Amino acid sequence: MRSVIQRVAWAKVSVNEKLKSAISTGLLVFVGIEDIDTIDDAIWLSNKIVNLRIFNDENNIPNLSVKDIYGEIILVSQFTLHALTKKGNRPSYIKASKPEHAIPLYHKLIECLEIDLGRPIQTGAFGADMKVELLNDGPVTILIDTQHKA
């Protein structure tokens, strides 16, 4: 699983011009799933996301996690995170999983995030054409790929 994690002051996702999800302070997480990803990757990634110490403490030092600050999370599926751009100018998405593999792992990641965070999270709509708005706080943007755990 490949993810882009953004610390946000707020974020929202709309589908067909209707608000699907919105959060205040927290994390906007884009996730792309490929065929080699497993349930273990979802478990590992969830733990990593929830415990990333990227929020400032009382001394303005990033020592706190989204869980520590009682922040919120929006998870948005984004197959384009697996774009291959080595050849030509049209990205190839051949590494991105088809829905039959990706959807169960996406739902597993939602489940893991809710357990690790201790409360429900917000989501986009898998496979939908979404409009995502956010105010990146920092800016802080972190890339994590479960294939590079070591």
Image: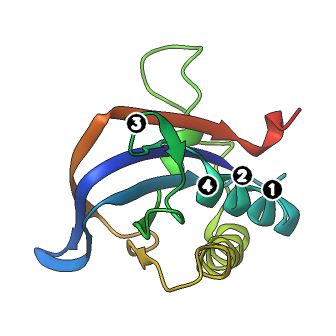
Separation of marks 1 and 2 at Cα, in angstroms: 6 Å
Separation of marks 2 and 4 at Cα, in angstroms: 19 Å
Q: Amino acid at mark 3?
A: Asn
Q: Position of residue 54 (x, y in %)?
A: 49, 42
Q: Amino acid at mark 2?
A: Glu
Q: Is residue 119 left or right of residue 51?
A: left
Of the two numbered discs 3 and 4 in the rendering, the one whose residue sits closer to the viewer: 3
Q: Nearer the viewer, residue 88 or 47?
A: 47
Query: Residue placed at 89% from the left, 32% from the top?
Result: 150
Query: Residue placed at 57% from the left, 35% from the top?
Result: 143
Mark closer to the chain start, 2 or 4: 2
Q: Confirm or deny contact between disc 1 and disc 4 (CB under 8 A).
A: no
Measured along the vertical axis of the image, is residue 32 above or below residue 90?
below
Q: Confirm or deny contact between disc 1 and disc 2 (CB under 8 A).
A: yes
Q: Confirm or deny contact between disc 2 and disc 4 (CB under 8 A).
A: no
Residue denoted by label 1: 37
In the image, which disc is placed on residue 59? Answer: 3
SS type, badge 4 = helix
In the image, which disc is placed on residue 34? Answer: 2
Tell me where residue 98 sits by quadrant. bottom right
Q: Is residue 109 left or right of residue 19?
A: right
Query: Residue placed at 79% from the left, 66% from the top?
Result: 43
Q: Amino acid at mark 1?
A: Asp
Q: Nearer the viewer, residue 109 or 57?
A: 57
Mark closer to the chain start, 1 or 4: 1
